[in-house]
Amino acid sequence: MTSIPRDQWYVAAYGAEIGHDLFTRTICGEPILFWRTRDGAVTAVPDRCVHRRFPLSQPPSRLVDDQVVCGYHGFTYDAGGKCVAVPGQSRIPRTARLLPYPVVEQDSFVWVFIGDRAKADTSRIPRAPWLVSPDYTTVAGMEPLRARYSLLVDNLLDLSHETYLHGGYIGTPEVAATPITTAVDEDAGIVYVSRHIDDAECPPFYAKSTGLRGRIARWQDIEYTPPCLYKLHSRIAPVGSVPHPDGADPDAFHVEVVYAITPETDHSTHDFWCVARDFALDDEEVSAFLAESNRTVVLQDVEALNVLEQVIATEPAGYQELSINIDTGGLAARRLLQRLCAAS
Ligand code: FES
Ligand SMILES: [Fe+2]
């Protein structure tokens, strides 16, 4: 099992979750306070008053203009974390300061950097452009998981579980029956897992959303950039249809399934999920169906992984798992995660 890599960018929230109100979320064990300032920027500082540790998200702490006033004794901080007022004296101690987290709002997500702030290179944040593209329509959510994030990484890197855990939703027999290919870009630090099924039953998730009847070609191309961003490029098309040599793919339906896997603590995870499609863009029924179906599928995973966390808690030290071919993606991901942990 891996621990949590530091000096990394993690998705803390959807941009839509943060307004001009105090918002708190624990990321990698660090309680963080967020709010959107009047100029629209998201600010993130530790959710702990430097005086006596009172959480600044906890009422009666409050936001006044762009300043947060501690609800215990009134220490007041500006959006940069600087303390601008303390009770009973005019001199403000020099160390009265909340160290802001580097924040980037991009592709509908709010990313924060956890670790040594001097290492926060924004160009290393992986992209998911479909989530804000006018050519796609996206549904999204976040489910709390009472399990370590590495269990979710394992889960998402091996989709053969769709056949069993998600039968009747997104799983059909051909998923587990079709071998995968795995590749690792060592320099970029990305794991790729592909499964191209030429002739498969169409699961309800895609039959109802695309309107395709009969059997389909189903391609699943996973791209995981540890630690946080997972993308599943999903292609659904009539059997026999392949993309044109120039890349055009007019007969196919494309769904970009994006997960942000953010550790909350060593034993809990924020499971952000998004489903972006390039068809039925204005069809609200399709949006509602995909949102509800994907949430159901995510909750099936959450239930299973919550159980696994309990199993791990009670197993004897030194227990050894057994891995087979379907696990090559998950094992590659663990190796890259261990490398990130060792470097941080
Ligand atoms: S704990 Fe915040 S002002 Fe005392
Ligand atoms: Fe799943």
Image: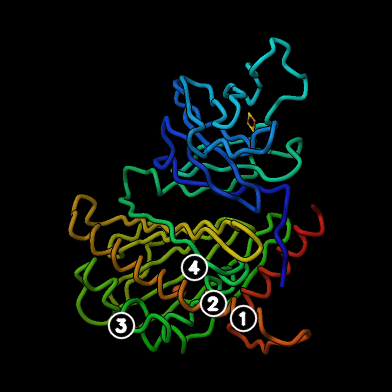
* Residue ranking furthest to the front: 88
For this rendering, which residue is in front, 129 or 312?
Answer: 312
The Cα atoms of the two marked residues, 1 and 4, are separated by 15 Å
| Ligand 2 - quadrant of the structure image | bottom left
Give the distance between the C-alpha atoms of the residues marked 3 and 4, in whole angstroms: 21 Å
Mark carried by residue 158 = 2
Q: Residues within 10 Å of mark 4 (few under 14, many from 20)?
A: many
Going from N to C along the chain, the mark reached first, 2 or 3, is: 2
State how far apart marks 1 and 2 are (Cα).
6 Å
Quadrant assignment, res 111: top right
Kindly check if marks 1 and 2 are in contact, taking CB atoms under 8 A apart as contact.
yes
Task: Report whether 47 appears left or right of 51.
Answer: left
Residue on which disc 1 sits = 327
Q: Which one is nearer the viewer's eye here, 166 or 77?
A: 77
Local packing at callout 1 (Cα closer than 10 Å; few below 14, some 14-19, many 20+) is: some
Q: Amino acid at mark 1?
A: Asp
How many C-alpha atoms fall within 10 Å of the one at disc 3: few (<14), some, or many (≥20)? few
Q: Nearer the viewer, residue 318 or 251?
A: 318
| Label 4 secondary element | strand
Judging from the image, the colouring scheme is rainbow
Single out the residue that lies furthest toward the right: 342
Q: Of circles 4 and 2, which is in front?
A: 2
Residue at (41% x, 66% y) in the render: 234
- The percent position of residue 124, horizontal first and vertical second, equals 65, 44
